[in-house]
Image: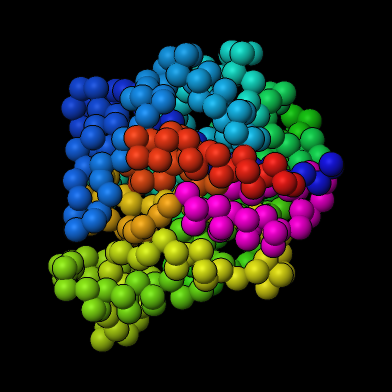
Amino acid sequence: MPNKIKPIAIYLPQFHPIPENDQWWGKGFTEWTNVVKAKPRFEGHYQPHLPADLGFYDLRLQEARLAQEQLAKAYGIHGFCYYHYWFNGKCMLYEPLDRKLKDPKEDLPFMMCWANENWTRTWDGLDKQVLMEQSYSTQDDIDHLKYLIPFFKDSRYIKVNEKPVFIVYKPFLFPNVTETVKRWRELAAENGLELYLCHAVFSYHKGWDTLLKGFDAAIDFEPFGIRRQSVFNEIERMNQSDSKVSLSKRIVKKIKRNLGYKDESLKPALNKLDYEFMVSNIKSLKEFSFKMFPNIVAGWDNSARRKNNPTLILDNATPELFEKWLTELVTDFIPYSEEENFIFINAWNEWAEGNYLEPSQKWGTAYLEKVKKVFDKY
């Protein structure tokens, strides 16, 4: 079946120590440090999220990476999309993918997404303190693409018509992303490659509900994607009647800024929303005039990482609701061509965001079973 839809799971390479995290957070810090410290913030709040079958793995170990790939293949995941951290020539959290590149046993297909943000103290909620700044320049565009070429040329790298797929997470942070894309394409051509470039789209950044010039496709990034109908209005409505949680003035101001509110009298959205609302309120792809790959979130709760200042908590997420949402996405999505047939799942292993397919102590392999059940039909 040539148009068979391919599920791509977004992959976080944070689960191993690095010198920078040792310096910033203490010796041996990894994402697991936050995961195990998480506590419920309100009655019925599910925390902490703890792993089951794979345990608290270290991604420097081949055994851990192979176990992940074997599990993904067993449940029908086509490939991983690795977050890629590049800061003006300095690469971070690179070891899992670098080691995969050298290991033919790790044969699961993969692609990369550049998480082109400042590295901040989001792990303790102080996201205004920049630890590693992200900046842009012509020379950096060139250096970055040169770094990526060996990955793009790997036989396991996911391609569309022989063009490696590369994703830019937040294109609106560039001073001129169109010029960067042009440079990348020119340099890729010099190395015998064409690129298939995608960027994420978000509902909270007004005006970015279209495909940017120079890109081939967009990716609806859930739970903040542009296909969502009035998510933040619904959070606001629900939480105005929720007296259990309150926001400081600082957080109120920040949320207003993030959501683009200009009316200071408008109360911002609080950070808790029922997962079922996400399932029930989504626009069809037919309403958009450009190529946009669907995205589904298995859950979302980054209070483990951001403590008392979570971006969003999707409450009452279950494998059954996940299956319902995924079924609707698959039914709605008509691949754009025989190879433009991806549905992204956010995420494979974002444990500190309550957002993962890997087996957990609460759900076991239930989320993976739902993925296999849905995609086995297509």
Q: Position of residue 5 (x, y in %)?
A: 72, 46
Q: Position of residue 12 (x, y in %)?
A: 44, 36
Q: Quadrant of residue 18?
A: top left
Q: Position of residue 313 (x, y in %)?
A: 32, 58
What is the number of callouts on the image? 0
Look at the image and tell me whether residue 24 can be seen: no
Residue 214 falls left or right of residue 41: right
Rendered residue at 74%/29% (across/down): 191
Residue 341 falls left or right of residue 15: right
Question: Magenta residues?
Answer: 319-344
Q: Quadrant of residue 17?
A: top left
In the image, residue 302 sits, relative to residue 202, either above or below, namely above
In the image, residue 261 sits, relative to residue 370, either above or below, namely below
- Quadrant showing the N terminus: top right
Residue 225 magenta: no
Q: Position of residue 3 (x, y in %)?
A: 81, 46
In the image, residue 30 sits, relative to residue 176, either above or below, namely above
Residue 336 magenta: yes
